[in-house]
Image (cartoon, rainbow, N blue to C red):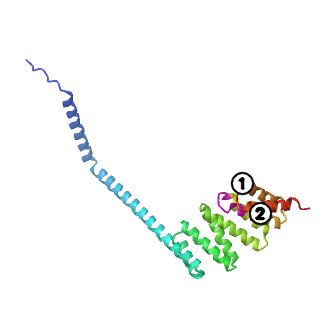
Amino acid sequence: MLKPRKRLVKTQLKEDQFVLMTAKAEAWFELHRMKVLYGIVAVVVAVGLGLAINWSRTTAAKNATFDEMLARDAYARADFDSALIRADAILDDYSGTSSAAVALMLKGRIFEQRAQFDEAVKAFEAVIDDYSGEDYLAFGAYYALGTIAAGKSEFEKAAEYYEKAASKYSKHFNAPAALLEAGKAFDKANKSPQAKSMYRKILSDYSKSRAADAARDNLAKLEFMP
């Protein structure tokens, strides 16, 4: 007579399933051993490369900041030759960084003070073209271009630069001053409607700024001109 089959309890079933899954995993690993090892190596290399790149970028950023500090110091001491050399080195070694934008601004300021206006314009335009996201510097570049144009009596051109500075970077603390300069330049270019528009914008958008009083006075003069 056949002996009745033993009934497996749930615990035994789980243990058997675990043993079966473990055996299958070991078999799969044996079959794909090299692929798994290559995969692990690839992950380790990728992580290591990522860390190396991040370290390199961090080091480059620190070096760029240090070189920028030296360039600023030379400029502050009016050692313009040294400032230019350091600025060019930053542009060569750290292109695309905020320090490179500062280097271009320093070059522009130096050329402007030396009355090398063509070179100054190139530097300021490079800031606008390549570093428009650097709000403070880009605003300064537009403003500087306006000042250079006004110095050449190119008043309408100057007004357009000032207006762009204020419109593109409306939250800049000097935006109302830029609008005021734009109004003055339009007035000198005999563009009274545009000048009035600049003054009115100051009174509507920057009524509490220092430029508001001057804008109000200038607008009153234009309104009552014969």
Q: What stretch is highlighted in magenta?
A: 168-182
Looking at this view, is 166 or 19 the one in front?
A: 166
Q: What residue type is labelled 2?
A: Ala
Q: Where is residue 14 in the image (x, y as percent from the top left)?
A: 22, 32
Q: In which quarter of the image is residue 76?
A: bottom right
Quarter placement of the C terminus: bottom right
Question: Mark 2 or 1 closer to N-term?
Answer: 1
Residue 14 inside the magenta-drawn segment: no
What kind of secondary structure does the magenta stretch mostly adopt?
Answer: helix
Q: Which amino acid does label 1 sit on?
A: Asp
Quarter placement of the N terminus: top left
Would you name the residue on which mark 1 appears?
205
Would you name the residue on which mark 2 appears?
214
In the depicted structure, whether residue 44 falls above or below residue 24: below
Looking at this view, is 202 or 65 the one in front?
A: 202
Residue sitting at x 40%, y 63%: 52
Secondary structure of residue under mark 2: helix
Relative horizontal placement of residue 110, taking residue 180 as reference (left or right): left
Secondary structure of residue under mark 1: helix
Relative horizontal placement of residue 165, taking residue 37 as reference (left or right): right
Q: Which mark is residue 2?
A: none
Residue 179 inside the magenta-drawn segment: yes
